[in-house]
Image: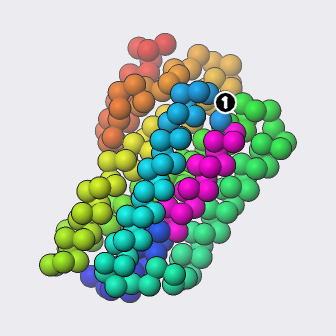
Amino acid sequence: MKKEQLEDLLLQALETEMGGVQIYSTALQCVQNDDLREEWEKYLEQTRHHVEVVRDLITELSFDGDKMTPARQVVHHIGESLVEAMQIAKKTSPPEAAEIVACECVVFAETKDHANWQLIGECAKKAKGEQAKALKAAYDEVEDEEDEHLYHSKGWCRELAIAALGMKAVLPPPEEEKDVKTAIGAAKAQHAREQML
């Protein structure tokens, strides 16, 4: 495993989590649905903790958590852009439309976040000794929450968009009701929504 690439991955992960705090904080200004508000408040607190987990991991592996790599710069820019998109929607759109934009922005951010943690998990499998132990501990602490963030947010996004189109939606979405934490579970929940209508 390439040390430079591992450092870059962890710096991207840190930037993604830090951006996630800003994204959830902004999304909460757009949310209309009380169940979704509760979910995002929980995710915001978990994401704040994930920032600490990644910072601690970077320190434990003797990397520089303040280093700005080109990839980290891109992640930072994307996070800022998602926050700006929500702010524009909040100023220019009806509240329900701004809520959907916020949900879409959360899904974009959580897709990158989820990918980071999958890669960290792969690194943990290939690393040796203390490095492997540190990567695995961080991965084990965060991964289930990241799965929930992504799959539940995708469900909310889909159902809010369906409702906005004037069709019958399942709110909270089936992913939430079935506490989905895998891609297979998300697919089954989406398929099961027909029976829930």
Secondary structure type for disc 1 = loop
Give x and y (percent) for residue 52. 42, 64
Give x and y (percent) for residue 21. 56, 56
79 left or right of 116 in image: right
Work out whether residue 65 or residue 78 is closer to the camera in this orientation and state it: 65
Is 125 above or below relative to 173?
Answer: below
Q: Residue at x 59, y 27 (%)?
A: 34
Tell me the chief SS of the magenta region: helix
Q: Residue at x 49, y 61 (%)?
A: 17
Identify residue for label 1: 32
Mark yes or no: residue 116 visible. Answer: no
138 left or right of 5 in image: left
Q: Residues within 10 Å of mark 1 (few under 14, many from 20)?
A: some
76 left or right of 111 in image: right
Is 9 above or below relative to 186?
Answer: below
Give x and y (percent) for residue 30. 69, 39
Q: Which quarter of the figure is the N terminus placed in?
A: bottom left
Q: State yes or no: residue 16 in magenta.
A: yes
Please state the extent of the stretch shown in magenta in the rendering: 15-30
Q: Amino acid type of disc 1?
A: Gln
For the rendered model, the colour scheme is rainbow
